[in-house]
Structures are given as structure tokens and as C-alpha cells.
Amino acid sequence: METSNKPGILYLCATPIGNLEDMTYRAVRLLGEVNRIAAEDTRHTRKLLTHYDIHTALTSYHEHNKFTKGPELIDYLLTGEDLVLVSDAGLPGIADPGSHLAQLAIAEGIQVTPLPGANAALSGLICSGLDTTVFTFVGFLPKTTKKKREILANLPKRPETLLFYESPHHLKATLKELADVLGQDRPAVVGRELTKKFEEFIRGSLGSIAAYFQDNQPRGEFVIIVDGYNSEADTDKVAETIEPADLVVQLMTEGLDKKIAMKQAAQQLGIRKRDVYQAVLAAEKRNPKG
């Protein structure tokens, strides 16, 4: 293939999160104009292209081949060819490997430009009724227990709205964990099947929503939106009624190791971790094991 002096453009193209009509005119045009589209799942993307009568060649680019396929796509762009990257749904780079390809392209001086469109997290946020001023996208929680607990331990006192993704198979467990860590009464909203026929928003507290899904089998893909920590609403009642050492013991009985339990106790009580550590040492001296 003849090499051009100027690299092509990497387009990061949003695709519908459910309703196939949620495409921009510009995105449809460019999908038809380029010679190649890199897709997370070519079978899934083919359905979208068929809907818009687009016959552009597809190549796979996903989490499991990004380290080998990424450099190949960069070489393709360096020949002067434009490339459109799509994920299965929503924006490339959000909870998928699109950001890796963008980083490779930027390092080679290749222009990276967005084709904006649907995003599940932001769509859920704007319909939640919770604060949209400041928010943090957490995405899918890690699968390993240790990494998951490390992330959850940092969330109880975060003041911004928190956004999560979850599959139907893990929703019940995740809601229970969030309720245990952030509080049963923390306001939250769960969005299900956004933009699709059975779109639904379940509103309430983390505890009430977790109870709802114990009685109603989760179906579809979910966005969880959780209100940020409110220091005014969450007064010092916890600190007045629960001793730091007792809270550490309680958290350890729930499965947290001692170090993470002390860190989370400090966050929940609004005190320094050093103070929690000293309280635990004092309690151990008063009640030595054995």
C-alpha cells in the first residue's frame, strides 16, 4: 500500500446504547466513507451497519487483542487512511479499550477526533434527578475481591455523584456491597435498558433498591447512579454511637482485612486514620486475646 506523507484520522465514533436511531448524520456518513472500521464485536456492529445500509469492511479490535492489533491499526493510519473506531455501545474509550488505541495514535502524531453521541452513564445521570454538577465515573467494579474492596473503601466520603455500570448477573451483589459501604439510606437511582423498549428507572435508597431486586430478577444492562456524601445530612451520630475500634471489628467481620477496615472506619467516622489505629491499639491492650 502506498504511504501518504500525512497520517489518516482516527475517529472515535459513538454508537447507540439501545435504540438504533440514536446516530448522528455525521457518524453515519463517515462510517460509509472510510475504508475500514475497527469494532469491538464485528457481529454486533454489522447489525448497525446493515440498519443504515453501510458496507464498509470491519476488523476486530477488543480487550483481548489490543496489544497486537493496536500497532497494526496505527500502521494503517500512518499510510494516510482514515479509521473509525466503534465499541459495542456508547463511546469508545469508556469501559472498553478505545482509550489504548487513542494513546497509541497520539504518540505517533495521528489526529484523534470524536464523533459524539450516546453514552449510558451520562444518559442515566441526566435522568436520575441527582446532582449533575460534579460526578465521578467508576464504571464496572473490579472482579477480584481485594481490588474491589480497595476502590469501595475510597468512596464513602466522596461528595460527588458516583456512576457505575453493572451486568444483570452481578447487580444484586453490587447493590448490596454499595449499600453496606455507602449506607442503606444513601439516595440512588438504577437505570435499566436505557433508550430501549423496556427502559426503566428505579429510584430510592441503596437499601430499598437492593431489596427491590431481591424480589425482581434483574434483566438487561444497568447504570447505577449514587448520590454523593452529604456531610450536613450525615451528622456525627455515627461517631457518637460507635467507637472506632468497634467499627473496625464490625467491618472485619464483614470480610475486610484489618488495614482496609481501619481506613474505611476513618472515612465513615470523619476522623484521621491514625486516631482509628490508636483506638484499636488501646482496645487490644484492654482486651488482649487469649
Image (cartoon, grey):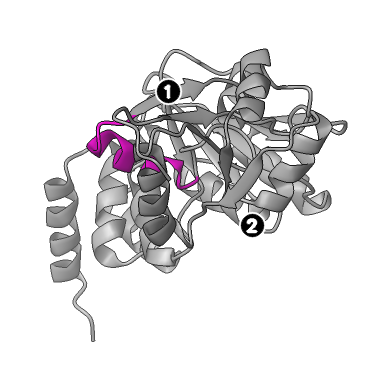
The front one of 54 and 260 is 54
Please name the residue shown 60% across and 17% down the image.
126
The residue positioned 36% from the left and 23% from the top of the image is: 231
**Residue 145 part of the magenta segment:** no
**Residue 107 magenta-drawn?**
yes
* Rendered image quadrant of residue 221: top right
Q: Is residue 69 visible?
A: yes
Q: Position of residue 150 (x, y in %)?
A: 33, 55
Question: Which image quadrant for residue 133?
Answer: top left
Using the image as rendered, state which of residue 184 and residue 28 is in the foreground. 28
Q: Amino acid at mark 2?
A: His
Residue 113 circle label: 1
Q: Quadrant of the C terminus?
A: bottom left
Identify whether 73 is placed above or below 54: below
Which residue is more in the foreground, 145 or 9? 9
Q: Is residue 184 above or below residue 199?
A: below
Q: CA distance from mark 1 to mark 2?
A: 34 Å
Q: Is residue 184 visible?
A: no
Question: Residue at coordinates 67% horizontally, 38% vertically from top-left?
Answer: 56
Residue bearing the label numbered 2 = 170
Nearer-N-terminus badge (1/2): 1
Asked whether, in this view, residue 94 is left or right of residue 210, the answer is left
10 Å crowding of disc 1: few (<14), some (14-19), many (20+) = few
Rendering quarter of residue 22: top right
Please report the bounds of the magenta region as a residue range.
96-110
